C-alpha cells in the first residue's frame, strides 16, 4: 500500500463495532464486490460505482469514496449517503462521485428490491452499448438475459437529476440495463445477486465482441430457446449463485483480506 493511500485511509477509522452488525455485513460484502470487480477487470479507474442499501427504514446507502480505485476500497472507507444526496459518513474524507449519486439514488428510490446496484464502464460492456442491436442471443450467458434486459439512451454524463425519471422508467422491473454509448448496470436484492448478474452480463458482452470481431456469421438462438435458458437460470432451487459468491470471497481472503477492514 502506498504512503499516499495510507494517509487517505488513516482518516477512515475502522467502523466494525461502531455501526450495527447488519450494516457492517453489508459494508464487508460491498467492499468485497469492489475488489472482485477489480479482480475481473470491470473497472474504469475511479469513475464507476457500486452501491448498497443500509438495512433499516432510513433509505441510506453506501457508495465508494471518490478517488479510490476499486482494489483500495475497504468496508470502513465506504461513504454513507441519504437519498437526497447528503453525506452522512465519509471516513476517508473523499466525497462521492456526483454522477454516481444521480444513477444510484434513482434506482434505490424506485426499487425497494434493488438493494445493490452495480454500474461499470468495461471495454466489452461499453462496446456492446454502442452497437445498435444491443446484446445478441449468441451465447448461453447472453440468453440468461433474454427478455430481461432494459436499455436507456445516452443523454450525456449523468449529472442532471431530471434524467432519473427516465432511468427509472427504462429499467422498470428488470434487473439489468444497458446504458447506450455508456456501459452496463445490474441490481439485486443482495450484493451477491447484483454481482452474479454483472459478471455474466460482462461475459456475454466479451463473447459478443470476440465473435463479431472474427468476421464469421454468428448464430442467434431462437427466442424459444433463449427464453428456456433464461428460465433455467431463474430456478428457485439453483444453488450455484451462493456457492460461487462464497468461492469468490475465499479468493479474496487468500489474496488480500484487507477489504474487511
Image (tube, helix red, strand yellow):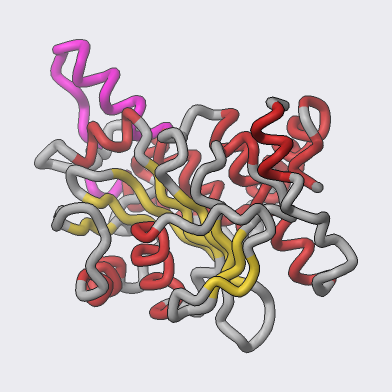
**Which is more toward the observer, 94 or 162?**
94
Q: Nearer the viewer, residue 30 or 2?
A: 2
Q: Is residue 139 above or below residue 158?
A: above
In this view, the residue farthest toward the right is 17
- The correct choice, above or below, for 168 with respect to 122 in the image is below
Q: Position of residue 206 (x, y in %)?
A: 35, 27
The reply, left or right, for residue 1 in relation to residue 62 is right
**Is 177 left, or right, of 187 in this rendering?**
left
Looking at the image, which residue is at 49% across and 28% down? 41
> Considering only vertical position in the picture, is 67 above or below 255?
below
Residue at the image position 56 percent from the left and 32 percent from the top:
38
Q: How many marks?
A: 0
**Residue at image coords 34%, 25%:** 207
For the magenta stretch, what is the residue range?
203-225
Q: Quadrant of residue 186?
A: bottom left
Placement of 159 over or under 249, stated as above or below: below
| Residue 172 is covered by the magenta coloring | no
Residue placed furthest toward the left: 132
Give how far across and how far down residue 145 sits, in percent: 36, 50
Residue 252 visible in the shown view: yes
Whole-percent x, y for residue 42 in the image: 46, 34
Q: Residue at x 55, y 69 (%)?
A: 115
Amino acid at each position: 500500500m502506498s504512503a499516499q493511500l495510507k494517509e487517505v485511509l488513516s482518516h477512515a477509522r475502522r467502523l466494525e463495532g461502531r455501526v450495527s452488525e447488519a450494516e457492517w455485513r453489508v459494508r464487508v460484502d460491498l467492499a468485497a464486490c469492489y475488489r472482485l470487480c477489480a479482480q475481473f477487470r470491470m473497472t474504469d479507474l475511479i469513475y464507476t460505482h457500486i452501491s448498497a442499501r443500509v438495512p433499516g427504514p432510513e433509505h441510506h446507502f453506501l457508495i465508494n469514496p471518490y478517488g479510490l480505485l476499486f482494489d483500495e476500497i475497504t468496508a470502513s472507507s465506504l461513504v454513507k449517503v441519504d437519498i437526497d444526496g447528503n453525506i452522512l459518513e465519509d471516513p476517508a474524507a473523499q466525497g462521492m462521485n456526483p454522477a454516481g449519486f444521480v444513477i444510484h439514488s434513482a434506482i434505490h428510490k424506485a426499487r425497494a428490491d434493488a438493494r445493490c446496484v452495480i454500474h461499470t464502464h468495461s471495454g466489452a460492456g461499453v462496446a456492446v452499448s454502442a452497437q445498435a442491436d444491443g446484446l445478441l442471443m449468441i451465447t448461453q450467458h447472453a440468453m440468461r438475459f433474454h427478455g430481461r434486459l432494459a436499455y436507456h439512451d445516452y443523454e450525456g454524463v449523468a449529472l442532471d437529476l431530471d434524467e432519473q425519471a427516465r432511468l427509472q422508467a427504462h429499467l422498470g422491473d428488470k434487473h439489468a440495463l444497458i446504458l447506450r454509448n455508456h456501459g452496463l448496470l445490474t441490481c439485486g436484492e443482495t450484493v451477491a445477486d447484483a454481482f452474479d448478474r454483472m459478471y455474466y452480463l460482462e461475459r456475454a458482452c466479451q463473447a459478443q465482441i470476440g465473435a463479431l470481431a472474427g468476421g464469421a456469421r454468428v448464430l442467434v438462438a431462437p427466442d424459444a430457446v433463449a427464453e428456456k435458458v433464461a428460465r433455467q437460470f431463474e430456478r428457485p432451487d439453483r444453488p450455484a449463485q451462493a456457492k460461487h459468491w462464497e468461492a469468490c470471497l475465499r479468493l479474496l481472503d487468500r489474496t488480500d483480506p484487507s477489504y474487511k477492514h
